[in-house]
Amino acid sequence: MAKIIGIMGESGAGKTTSMRGLDPTTTYYFDCDKKGLSWRGWKKQYNGEAKNYRCTDDQAEVLAILHGINDKCPNIKTVIIDTLNGVMVADEMRRSREKGYDKWMDLAVAVYGIIDYALTMRDDITVIFICHSQTVRDDSGYMFTSIKTNGQKLSKIGLETKFPIVLHAKCVSGEYVFETQANLSTAKTPLGLFEDKTIPNDITVVLQAIEEYENG
């Protein structure tokens, strides 16, 4: 069973930039927002010639490539889907003229299908789902942040329930960090994985901590 990680945050919170330290020779990058990556020189690291980058928001294509990575690409150890919301929005826009319940059910099945398959991939693979966040304020002024979804069906599922780790990317006083524990949010990590409630915005630090945690 593969490891999966959810990273949520607002636009500009450093979600994509936190991937900059990964080894391109062992990483596959899905650019589902079709906006490119956010550090200098990324095109030399991730591109079609290197066969480690795909600019697509099509759920079926993402799922097909995941199958290929799992079965035929033993060198790939980390897969990034940036962002899962890109897949959601694209599916909704392609079917904007359709009415009724079926459209939203199909969207939920498409997104859930990617996450569910990722969980069954090889043990040596980590799949990182980068997601936009939403902060809701109730009438009393209480605010809570979670992964943003399209359609009530996905909201009822609660994507965080599928992720054992959810990191909240934030910029606090000019410093880009990950929150590791709930702070009016759905951020969560296994007990004892991180001592600090905030850690550097660097996915390689996270992956190293997970490896050390699992090896005891």
Image: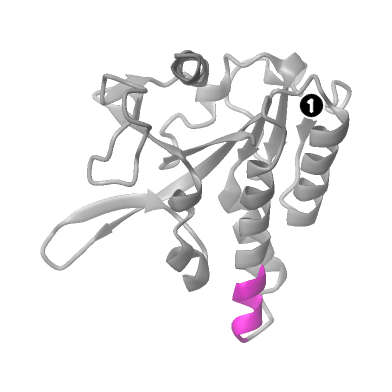
- 128 or 56: nearer the eye? 128
Looking at this rendering, what residue extends furthest in the left direction?
A: 140
Residue assigned mark 1? 52
**On-image quarter of the N terminus:** top right
Image location of residue 130, percent across then percent down: 54, 39
Image location of residue 110, percent across then percent down: 68, 61
In the image, residue 189 sits, relative to residue 118, either above or below, namely above
Q: Describe residue 61's horizontal placement relative to residue 16 as left or right.
A: right
Q: How many marks?
A: 1
What residue is shown at x 33% (from left), y 21% (from top)?
A: 194
Which segment is the magenta one? 100-106
Image location of residue 177, percent across then percent down: 35, 24
- 215 or 112: nearer the eye? 215
Amino acid type assigned to the residue bearing label 1 in the image = Asn
Q: Quadrant of residue 53?
A: top right
* Residue 45 in sight here: no
What residue is shown at x 34% (from left), y 40% (from top)?
A: 187
Q: Describe residue 16's horizontal placement relative to residue 187 as left or right.
A: right
Is 162 included in the stretch rendered in magenta?
no
What residue is shown at x 63% (from left), y 43% (from top)?
A: 119
